[in-house]
Image (cartoon, rainbow, N blue to C red):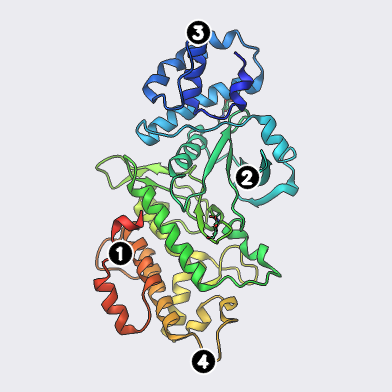
Amino acid sequence: MEMKKIACGVLFAAASMTAVMAAEEAGAPAPGPSSSAAAALPALGSLVGASLVKRKKKEEEILFQENGSLLLEELIASSGGIYNPIRTFSSHQILQATNHFDWNYVISEDRFVWYKGLIENRRVLIKKFQDCSLFDADNFYRDIAVSSLMSSHKNALKLLGCCLEFPHPVLVCEYPENGALNCVRRAREGATRPFPWKVRLKIAKEIAEAVTYLHTQFPRTIIHRDLKLANIFLDENWTAKLSSFSLSIPIPEGETGVNDMACRTSSYIEPDYLNTGFVTENVDIYSLGIIMLILLTGKSEYTSEVAVYLPVLPVYVGKLLDRGLLTKVIDPSMLESVSDDGIPEHLRLQMEAFIELAFRCVKFKQGEKVLHMIDVARELKKIEKTYLTPQTVLVRLETDPSLSSEELL
Ligand SMILES: *[C@@H]1O[C@H](CO)[C@@H](O)[C@H](O)[C@H]1NC(C)=O
Ligand SMILES: *[C@@H]1O[C@H](CO)[C@@H](O)[C@H](O)[C@H]1NC(C)=O
């Protein structure tokens, strides 16, 4: 059997792949992609042993094998054994798609470099790790494993597959036409379409929904831990797509958090976590709160005109609001479409409710009860749906039966 055939052969998860190889080795027909983790695991032993020796040991094949088994372990750990097959791409396909990682193909850059590429006539986004100092091997595979688990959610950037033939894995994702949120401003210079309030509100809501899914839909609560503009993408319809799960971390059952080194990957990490290294749900809630304020004010670490230290954003916004200066708070580009009468009443109410919620997320104002991500997602959905007049708001907030938790997921 030829190794390359499998590497390009597209269909199987690392788990299934090793099972396929072991099976073919033994002269049995290959099992389908549905072969379970349990069935695939024994194959791992033979993978490192006899079956490998017979093959020509091209470096990429070795990388593929060893990293594949690491990926398999991470997948099983993250999903509790239930995961989808992950397609694999060859290094040749990746190099061809990105013109050997040509900088002209880069659409966004952070600790990863994101390239646009074309594979089998489909536009894809290819992610290569750049600054690897922060990461253990676990982090690379967790990114693939959790991206794969999240791919069924409409607000997660869909993982199409990965390539394990490089020293660090390369991810292949669906292509988001409107790029990364941190690049929108740059990309939009000279653009004719404004980035309206409605879209900003929708992005906040969609990210809250994606993170709610991450927090609630797996055997253990998974904390993203790296929510920031660079990890949010926008498709052609301005639908938000959450990505980059390399720092995500599961919370042990029955615990409220988990100790881990504080990763200072953006300037808006929850202060408690920075001080103690204890990761809780609040880490994501806090980051989302700051993202909401960035969406509203247009001030981010990527804003050129003012260097804003983001953790002071709530204070900044709070001070202006106390003086009744909402128009000074919001991104000036949103004001272009506003008449001299100021911000229309229903938009003002919407923005104020939005700010109130953001303040609760960052604990700038304490709410009456503990806030979970699902509450944030629900509130954002309400804010988006209601706001006609103050009276209708109150009535609808209390009685709207459509706002059930099922609907959020
Ligand atoms: C992939 O496998 C190679 C060979 O064992 C190893 O050197 C490399 O560090 C692995 N990559 C990661 C991210 O673990
Ligand atoms: C965007 O919306 C259009 C019209 O509803 C739809 O046909 C298209 O598939 C959407 N694009 C994506 C990427 O979902």
x and y, in percent, of residue 335 in the image:
57, 81
Kindly report the distance in space between the C-alpha atoms of the residues bearing marks 1 and 3: 55 Å
Q: Secondary structure at mark 2?
A: strand
Q: Residue under circle 3?
A: 27
Q: Residue under circle 4?
A: 341
For label 3, count other residues whose C-alpha is less than 10 Å away and answer few (under 14), some (14-19) or many (20+): few
- 266 left or right of 114? left
- Sequence-wise first label, 3 or 2: 3
Disc count in the image?
A: 4
The answer to whether the residues at label 4 and label 3 have Cβ atoms under 8 Å apart is no
Kindly report the distance in space between the C-alpha atoms of the residues bearing marks 3 and 2: 36 Å
- Sequence-wise first label, 4 or 2: 2
> Residue 403 bears which disc, if any?
1
Q: Secondary structure at mark 1?
A: loop
> Residue 80 bears which disc, if any?
none
For label 1, count other residues whose C-alpha is less than 10 Å away and answer few (under 14), some (14-19) or many (20+): some
x and y, in percent, of residue 109 in the image:
64, 50
Q: Residue under circle 2?
A: 124
Task: Tell me the kind of residue under disc 4.
Answer: Asp
**Does mark 3's beta carbon lie closer than 8 Å to ligand 1?**
no
Kindly report the distance in space between the C-alpha atoms of the residues bearing marks 4 and 2: 45 Å
Q: Which residue appears at 54% of the width and 58% of the height?
A: 229
Task: Tell me the kind of residue under disc 2.
Answer: Val
